[in-house]
């Protein structure tokens, strides 16, 4: 079966509009990581608040890498509907068992986000054990991203952008346009982070809960489109001298109302889950004293390395061949 590990995939092929595409979806990811900091216990929150800007800004690194780094793209989704069923016997919950059953190429083709969450959880625990502040922050930011992706209904299906149901563009609509328009009124008081006794089960539970909402995501948008017509569905907006077609504000409001708080629920679930996993990693690492690490400041060399790394992603992005 064709592997996605070496492909540009999911939303679109590289183009001269992709640089603009990269900013879509960033808002929600950044807000989720930032808000998760405030769920942490007193032993952790001072350290995380000190680095809240880093955790917020770098929440989007996996999206920046996904078109430029081999193997990154499958970490963001899983096509549950690509499998005959998703019971334990047909879709193993542990990655090694899944590889033995399906092979790495098939898993990469259909996405690995729940397994990636488990792997990144382990990596963050190890970073805490090593008291490696730079790695703690980088991996914590990545973990927040993958968890947020697992809570998006359209990250759980082959019909990830409505392309199979003539609803092209619904992915960015649900994941980006709606949060940007309406999340200012969301209630993000989710309570304090709690220990996750089975990170593996928690990752899969999030994916299945998101998938259960998929029917509403697609059905309500189609019904509303049929009612108001294509002419009232879109509007045009000018940003930085570029005119873009987007979902109209009135259409967005009506759709958001029909979803009855679905986007808010999934964002809240993401915030709570990110905080829970960060806390769990710290506990599993032996609860290292983060006050001892609070004075960390990146060196000039580390700052240069961060800049060069992100530049390398862009270089790869704009040099990739469409057939890769």
Image (cartoon, rainbow, N blue to C red):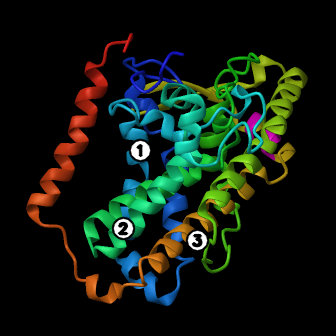
Q: Residue at the top extreme?
A: 323
Q: Residue at x 21, y 44 (%)?
A: 309
Q: Position of residue 47 (x, y in %)?
A: 37, 80
Which residue lies under the disc numbered 3?
Answer: 276
- Mark 1 secondary-structure assignment: helix
Is 190 one of the magenta-colored residues? no
Distance Cα–Cα, label 2 vs label 1: 20 Å
Q: Residue furthest left?
A: 301
User: 74 above or below 53?
Assistant: above
The magenta segment? 251-256
Instruction: Quadrant for residue 154, please give it.
Output: top right
**The one of 323 and 177 positioned closer to us in this rendering:** 323
Left or right: 258, with 94 as reference point = right
Residue 73, x across and y down, in percent: 46, 33
Is residue 175 in sight in this rendering? yes
Single out the mark in the foreground, 1 or 3.
3
In the rendered view, tell whether residue 157 sits above or below residue 42: above
In the rendering, at what x and y percent does residue 15 appear? 39, 17
Task: Tell me the residue that label 1 is attached to.
Answer: 62
Q: Quadrant of the C terminus?
A: top left
Question: Is 253 a magenta residue?
Answer: yes
Which of the pair 213/27 is nearer the observer?
213
Q: Label 2 belongs to which residue?
A: 126
In screen coordinates, is 65 left or right of 143? left
Sequence-wise, the earlier of marks 1 and 3 is 1
Q: Label 2: how many residues lie within 10 Å, few (<14), some (14-19) or many (20+)?
A: some
Q: Nearer the viewer, mark 2 or mark 3?
A: 2
Secondary structure state at the residue bearing disc 3: helix
Residue pictured at 19% horizontal, 73% vertical = 297
């Amino acid at each position: 079966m064709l592997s996605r590990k070496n492909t540009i995939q999911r939303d679109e092929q590289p183009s001269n509009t992709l640089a603009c595409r990269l900013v879509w979806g960033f808002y929600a990811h950044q807000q989720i990581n930032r808000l998760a900091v405030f769920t942490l216990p007193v032993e952790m929150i001072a350290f995380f608040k000190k680095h809240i800007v880093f955790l917020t800004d770098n929440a989007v690194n996996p999206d920046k890498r996904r078109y430029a780094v081999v193997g990154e793209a499958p970490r963001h989704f899983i096509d549950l509907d690509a499998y005959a069923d998703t019971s334990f016997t047909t879709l193993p919950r542990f990655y090694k068992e899944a590889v033995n059953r399906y092979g790495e190429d098939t898993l990469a083709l259909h996405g690995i986000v729940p397994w990636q969450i488990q792997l990144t959880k382990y990596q963050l625990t190890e970073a805490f054990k090593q008291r490696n502040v730079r790695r703690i922050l980088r991996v914590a930011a990545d973990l927040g991203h993958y968890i947020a992706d697992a809570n998006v209904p359209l990250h759980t299906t082959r019909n990830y952008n409505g392309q199979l149901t003539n609803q092209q563009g619904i992915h960015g609509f649900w994941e980006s346009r709606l949060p940007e328009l309406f999340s200012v009124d969301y209630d993000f008081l989710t309570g304090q982070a709690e220990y996750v006794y089975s990170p593996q089960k928690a990752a899969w539970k999030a994916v299945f809960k998101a998938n259960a909402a998929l029917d509403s995501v697609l059905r309500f948008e189609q019904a509303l489109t049929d009612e108001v017509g294509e002419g009232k569905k879109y509007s045009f907006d000018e940003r930085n001298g570029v005119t873009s077609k987007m979902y109209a504000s009135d259409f967005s409001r009506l759709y958001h109302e029909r979803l009855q708080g679905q986007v808010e629920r999934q964002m809240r679930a993401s915030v709570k889950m990110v905080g829970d996993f960060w806390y769990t990693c710290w506990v599993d690492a032996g609860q290292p004293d983060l006050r001892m690490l609070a004075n960390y400041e990146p060196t000039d060399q580390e700052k240069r390395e961060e800049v060069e790394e992100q530049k390398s992603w862009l270089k790869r992005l704009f040099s990739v061949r469409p057939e890769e």
